[in-house]
Image (cartoon, rainbow, N blue to C red):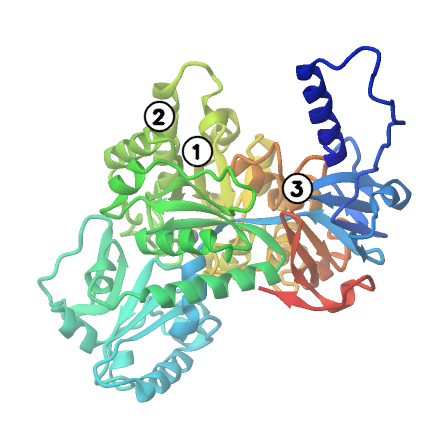
Amino acid sequence: MPRSFLRAAAFSGFCTLLGCPPSAPPPEKPAVTVPPRADLVLVSGNVETLDPGTPKASAVAIKEGRIAAVGSDDDIKPWIGDQTRVVELHGKTVLPGLVDSHAHLAALGLRRFGVDLVGTRSLEEVRSRVKKAALAAKKGEWIIGRGWDQNDWESFKKKGLKFPSAKDLDDVSPDHPVMLHRIDGHAIWVNTKAMQFVGVDAHTKAKPGGEIVKGKSGKPSGIFIDNAMEIISDKTPAPSKDELKQAILAAQKECLAAGLVQVHDMGIGHPALTVLRELDQAGELKLRVYAFLDGSTEDLGAMLAAGPLIPTDAKSHLTVRGVKLFIDGALGSRGALLLKPYSDDKKSSGLLVTKPEVLQSRVMQATRAGFQVATHAIGDRGNQIVLDAYQKMLSATSSSGRTASILRPRIEHAQVVAPEDIGRFGKVGIIASMQPTHATSDMPWAESRLGKERLKGAYAWHSLLTANATIAAGSDAPVEDVSPVLGLYAAVTRKNLFGEPEGGWTPKQKMTRAEAVRAYTTGGAWASFRETEAGVIKKGYVADLTVLDKDPMTAPEDDLSGLRPQLTIVGGSIELEVKTATVGTSTTARTH
Ligand SMILES: [Zn+2]
């Protein structure tokens, strides 16, 4: 409302109170209509609104953090005033802000503090990186790393070995304890020094849902899977608060540069929660973070008692209203819980990380405390147990029939689903939170783990979408690269970055381009209860936008992985700006 109008209203009210004489009415002034002006205007773009009413536009006006108008350049012209920043897009594509519905911000940023093993192609490469770190470390210091994947080591696989062992690390780090997280975060590999430090021997037992891999002698080999990981990790130094803060800020920068406006941060503990809250209060959280508390921590009860944190102030970017739970491990380390044994290990059907009755009670506890539940489930039996638990929770919570859309329970990964369970996602209203690049990373070995038949329900995007499920797409970074365009490429092609295999892997399960873009926009909005204000470009919605150099709806398929973010706009504020994107009032590159 214009200030002049408020003043006039106040004056007329004053006059009425004192009783102005009817003979002296205030002189009537002609009504002046001041056209509203935008803070920011994007023009000459290719705007993919995802709003069925107006699917295409060329310009967007943004005012006070929200979309004020969408239309042609001419439609938007009246919004341009003296103070309006105008960005000329030269045909670049504007999408609703891209969302990563499953990532781990702290872990993504913490890679910089440890030995980064992502992308190592051989055991030798890992050994040389560990050796380098050990030589540089202070006396007694732990060497902590992340990102190894034995499935990528050709010569190792040829020998028919399942996992590396402590011995592989002993000679490169004889004096420092070493702990290396597998790429999926579901197994750790240590040296003998670390086992001695912790006091692990042949008598050490893993908790249910965990496995200590044993060598021929019956002694621990140096690999600890799922619930057995804490035997080691509980004894290693946790990152300091400052390291955590630096890690989260570094991860934020990486996400904004990748074109993301929001990340669903999965399974945070109290230390990360404290840092996120402080960053948000200080106005340093530029990325929207939709956080899920770690449902396996001891202080969960206290964190739940505080209730969800849902921002009311537009400046706040932190929401905490979810709890992350686990039912099983990962496929790469054979921890995913299957209905029938692994095709390449008939003695194993995977690991049940949480007993079904414990899962059920945690699901109920979180729901009663007002939190959304998101449970990690990879194997077909894991998925079945979680679907059962959610259905029980939904029928116990209400009989209104709308419960699922109120509570929006999610399954994280939903990676291998039995054919009879696929329909349950859509029918019951359970969100499938899936990571397209997991399919293309796992495709070289997924069939040997699962066999041909079971593969039909693996990474089954098309089947789930056909059965009316909502897919919210993400990266699971740092397990995979955080870039959403790599996810779009994987979703649409089911090929690796070398364009293999020709035609895509199990191509029936590809997403269309529109489905893939929706999984990264409207899917993420629905999964975080924001569909009435985010996910499409529409008047009144928050101004969360991603500008790419080319249109993912029409760019050649092989170009999708190379699409470059040009602008990342969160709540109307430009948080990433690539110089070449603008020939407007500013050409400064800026990232936070
Ligand atoms: Zn994850």
N-terminal of the pair, mark 2 or mark 3, is 2
**Up-down relation of residue 27 to residue 153 (above or below):** above
For the residue carrying disc 3, how many other residues have a C-alpha within 10 Å: few (<14), some (14-19), or many (20+)?
many
Looking at the image, is mark 2 or mark 3 nearer the viewer? 2
Q: Label 2 vs label 3: CA separation?
A: 29 Å
Split into 4 quadrants, where in the image is the C terminus? Answer: bottom right
Mark identifier at residue 515: 3
Apparent side of residue 523 relative to residue 146 in the rendered image (left or right): right
149 and 517: which is toward the camera: 517
- Residue at the top extreme? 22
Query: Which residue type does callout 3 highlight?
Result: Glu
For disc 2, the marked residue is: 393
Apparent side of residue 223 relative to residue 525 in the rendered image (left or right): left
Looking at the image, is mark 3 or mark 1 nearer the viewer? 1
Query: Which residue type does callout 1 highlight?
Result: Pro
Mark identifier at residue 138: none
At x 38%, y 85%, the residue is 128
Query: Which residue type does callout 2 highlight?
Result: Met
At x 45%, y 14%, the residue is 400
For disc 1, the marked residue is: 409
SS under mark 2? helix
